[in-house]
Amino acid sequence: MEHIDDRQIKADDRQYVLHSWTRQKDVHPKIIRKANGIFFWDEAGRKFYDMCSQLVYLNVGHHHPKLMEEFKHIGEIPLASPGFATASKAELAKKIIEVAPENMAKVFFANGGADSNDHAVKIARMFTGRYKIFSRYRSYHGATFGAGNLSGESRRFTVEPGLPGFIKFETPYLYRETVHFDSEEAAADFYLERLNNQILYEGPDTIAAIFMETIPGSNGVLIPPKGYMEGVRELCTKYGILMICDEVMAGFGRTGKMFAVEHFDIKPDIMTFAKGVTCGYSPLGGVIVSREIADYFDDHVLMTGLTYSGHTVSTQIGCATLDIYKEEHLVEHAAEMGEVLADRLEQLKRFASVGDVRCIGLFAAVELVKDKATKEPLIAYGMDYGKDKAGLMSKFVGLLMAHGFYTYSHESSVMIAPPLIITADELNEAMDLFEQALTDFEKLYLF
Ligand code: PLP
C-alpha cells in the first residue's frame, strides 16, 4: 500500500469510518506506527506496553516472526469454498481436536467469536430439538443479533427487545454478592440451587443449552467458585441440556491452560473459540462439538454455513499459530507469568480505590471502587460504552495511557491481559506504570 501521511489517515478515518460502541465525535484514534512483541509505538513515537493484547487476542505478540514468514506462503494453498477439503482446514481442525478435551471430535469454522456463538446455538437447537437457551448476566458473547441476545451485560440492550427463548441467569460474582458464604463450595451450592429452580420454572424439556463464558472476561474476569462448573455440568446431564462453553477470550492459553475448561472437572458438549486461534493475524472462529453431536450430523443435515467457513488463509495462519503455542511453550509460560501477575495484583490491594483483584493465568481484572467499605463502584452499571466519557474510569484509562500502559475497561474493572510471551521483567515494569497511574488517579480525582 502506498504511504499515506498521518494527518490524511486521521482525516479519512474521521470522515469515512464508523467506530464501534462509541459516539463518533468522541473518537480520536491513535495510529500504530510500529509494533513488536508486547510493545507498540504510536504516530508520535510513544511506546506502549500492550497490556490487553489489543482486544485480548494477540497471545503470541505483535509482529511474530513465524507468522510474518507464513504470510509469504499465502496463496500456495488455493482458495476453496467450504465444500472443498483443503490442507490448512483439515490440518487445523485436527490440531484443535488434539488439544481440546478428549470428548471433542469435530470443528465447524466461522469468522469470529460472535458468529461462532450464533452457530453453536443453531447446532444445539438442531441436536436437541429444543429451543430455549440459558445464558448469564455479566457475560459478553458478541455483537451479532444471536450473540447479542446471548450476552447478559449492557451491550445486549442494542438488540432489545430480544429474541424469545433466550433466558438469563446469574453469574457467581462473590465480590458483589450480598449473601455471606463460609466457603466457595457453599457459594456454588447457592447459585446452583437457584439455577436448578430456574430450569424447573422454564421447563427442562424446552431448554437446548446452557451457554457460558467459561470464565467471563470483559465483565471482570469472574472466576467461578469451587464446584460451580461441575454442578452446572451435572444439571445439564440430568436434564439433557447441552453445556456450551464460550472460550473465545479465555481459550488458547490465556488462563494458563490451553482451554479454561481444563481448570475444572468438566467436559462441555460444545466449545466456541476465535481470537487466540490465529491471534488476530487473520480473522477466524469456530465451534468444537463432542463425538455424540458430530455423529448425529452423519445422518442429519447440518443446516448452517458461511461463505468463508474454513477460509484457506485464516486456517493456514491458524496452523502456524498453534505450532507457536507448542514450540514456545506459551501455555506453561502463561501459567508461570500468571503467578508474577497475581503477586503484583495482591500488592495493589494497599490502594484505597482497589476493591478487588481477580487473576487466572494472564487473565486479570482490577475492580475499582470509590469507597472500599461500601464497595461503591467507580461508575454505575451500564454507564460505560460512550456514556462515561467525562467519568472517572475514562480518566483512569487515560492516565494509564499517559504512562504507556495500554488497556481497556468495562464498568469499574480494568483488564490486564498481556501477550502470553511477556517476561517477568516486562510484567513488573508494566505493573510499576500501573501503580504510578493509580497513585496519580487517586490524588487527582478521588481522595
Ligand atoms: N465471546 C467472548 C467471550 C468475547 O470476549 C468476545 C469478544 O470479545 C466474543 C465472544 C465476540 O467475538 P467477536 O468480536 O470476534 O465477534
Image (cartoon, rainbow, N blue to C red):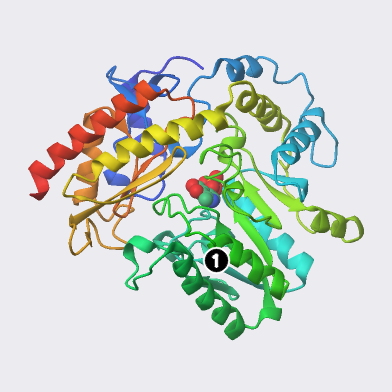
- Residue at 65% x, 68% y: name it: 234
Is residue 173 toward the left or the right of residue 356 in the image? right
Is 251 or 383 nearer to us in this picture? 251
Q: Is residue 1 above or below residue 202?
A: above
Residue 53's quadrant in the figure? top left
Image coords of residue 361 (percent x, y): 47, 39
Please state which of residues 108 and 204 is positioned toward the viewer in this rendering: 204
**In the image, residue 341 above or below residue 446:** above
Residue 108: percent from the left, percent from the top? 74, 47
Callout 1 crowding tier (Cα within 10 Å): few <14, some 14–19, many ≥20 = many
x, y percent for residue 353: 19, 50
Residue named by callout 1: 135
At 42% from the left edge and 24% from the top edge, which residue is drawn? 38
Q: Type of residue at label 1? A: Ser
Tell me the residue at 45%/54% (across/down).
223
Residue lying at the far right in this picture: please name it. Answer: 299
Q: Residue at x 32, y 64 (%)?
A: 176
8 over 108 or under it: above or below = above
Residue 441 image offset from top left, x and y in percent: 15, 41
Judging from the image, what secondary structure is the residue with disc 1 in? strand
